[in-house]
Amino acid sequence: MPPSRLLVTGGAGFIGANFVHYWLAKHPGDRLVVLDALTYAGNRASLATAAGHPSYRFVHGNILDLNLVTGLLREEEIDTVVHFAAESHVDRSILGPDAFIETNVVGTHTLLKAARAVWLAGSGRPHRFHHVSTDEVYGSLAPADPPFSERTAYAPNSPYSASKASSDHLVRAYHHTYGLCTTTSNCSNNYGPYQFPEKLIPLMMVNILHGKPLPLYGDGQNIRDWLYVEDHCRGIELVLERGGVGEVYNLGGHNEWANIDIVRLLCRLLDEAFAQDPELIRRFPDAPASQGRLAASLITWVKDRPGHDRRYAIDAEKSRRELGYLPKESFASGIEKTIAWMLANEPWWRQVMDGSYRDWIGRQYGA
């Protein structure tokens, strides 16, 4: 099989950067072009170790730029698009939905138009357009409901999930109407290295290290299925290699946790880390463990956000059956790796948490 030539959109973001590192390690002979607008959640420092790879190229640009995208597909003779680029934070979508419609809907449509022009009306080369989506498009589950499957009806409840649902439908339409070779994956909540600290796990870890409040919405009983980010990257690899054209695949961690239990676990694990490594007390003097207190004392209850989905859970049986997909990391091993990475990469998260972002977090959560 000849080497592939990939365009990865949003490759400087959390999941995109992990995918870039994963793909270069597993497929060193493939060409990999990253396109990223470097908004607040995109960080070239996340790709620093990829920069020296001979098959890697970074392009600072926006998926809304049709001429740029079309030019890259032609110039680089791209045969595979892996589309991560998206606005993805629910709280931000509630406060400012316009950017989510622009990037997630119009941006995805721009990519599809470019792909159609180059691959269908142009070169005619074998191709794949893979669209990375979310379990949030399916809405919310009651405690006793079965997990979301690929047959679950869409019922998005936030501007973010509605924008992703719209992009999913556009990808489907371009396959069925024009014959574009597409696949879509809907994943559960990811965690791991390079995650921007507005999301639950890195936010709570950073706040513990700084002795800041740990803001929990409502009663803390909102449940999510958690997937280690490298397992997600493996799942996408399997979709690209074995997935049927036009198909949708759910990628989940089989790992449901209530938010309050996640936070309590992080508190306990970081307390234990401080007890085992006195150097952490010097590095993080404001952390509760440095002052003889428990991290759980920082838990703070805040007003629930509007339209807060109660539970997400993924049924990944189709991916297991058709692709051989199963997560390799348990939650215990994945969270251990995540904490170790955060403690070892303090310069990275300090750099991304600039003053404007800290101000925004403070306004949102009182942190």
Image (cartoon, rainbow, N blue to C red):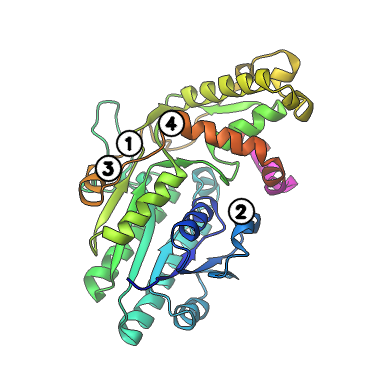
Quarter placement of the C terminus = top right
The type of residue carrying mark 4 is Phe
Label 2 – label 1 distance at C-alpha: 29 Å
**Between residues 213 and 27, which one lies in front from this camera angle?**
27
Q: Which of the marked residues, 4 or 3, is nearer the chain's N terminus?
A: 3
Residues in magenta? 351-361
Residue 352 lies, in percent from the top left, at 68, 48
Whether residue 360 appears in magenta in the rendering, the answer is: yes
The type of residue carrying mark 2 is Ser
Residue 238 lies, in percent from the top left, at 32, 55
Label 3 – label 2 distance at C-alpha: 29 Å
Q: Which residue is mark 2?
A: 46
Label 1 – label 3 distance at C-alpha: 10 Å
Magenta stretch secondary structure, dominant: helix
The type of residue carrying mark 1 is Ala
Q: Is residue 293 above or below residue 218?
A: above
**Element at label 2:** helix
Q: Which residue is mark 3?
A: 316
Q: Label 4 near label 2: C-beta < 8 Å?
A: no
Q: Is residue 220 above or below residue 353?
A: above
Query: Disc number at residue 331?
Result: 4
Query: Disc number at residue 108?
Result: none
Q: Which of the marked residues, 3 or 2, is nearer the chain's N terminus?
A: 2
Q: Which residue is mark 1?
A: 313
Quadrant of res 300:
top right
**Element at label 3:** loop
Q: Which of the marked residues, 2 or 4, is nearer the chain's N terminus?
A: 2
The type of residue carrying mark 3 is Ala
Question: Neighbour class for label 2 at 10 Å: few (<14), some, many (≥20)?
Answer: many
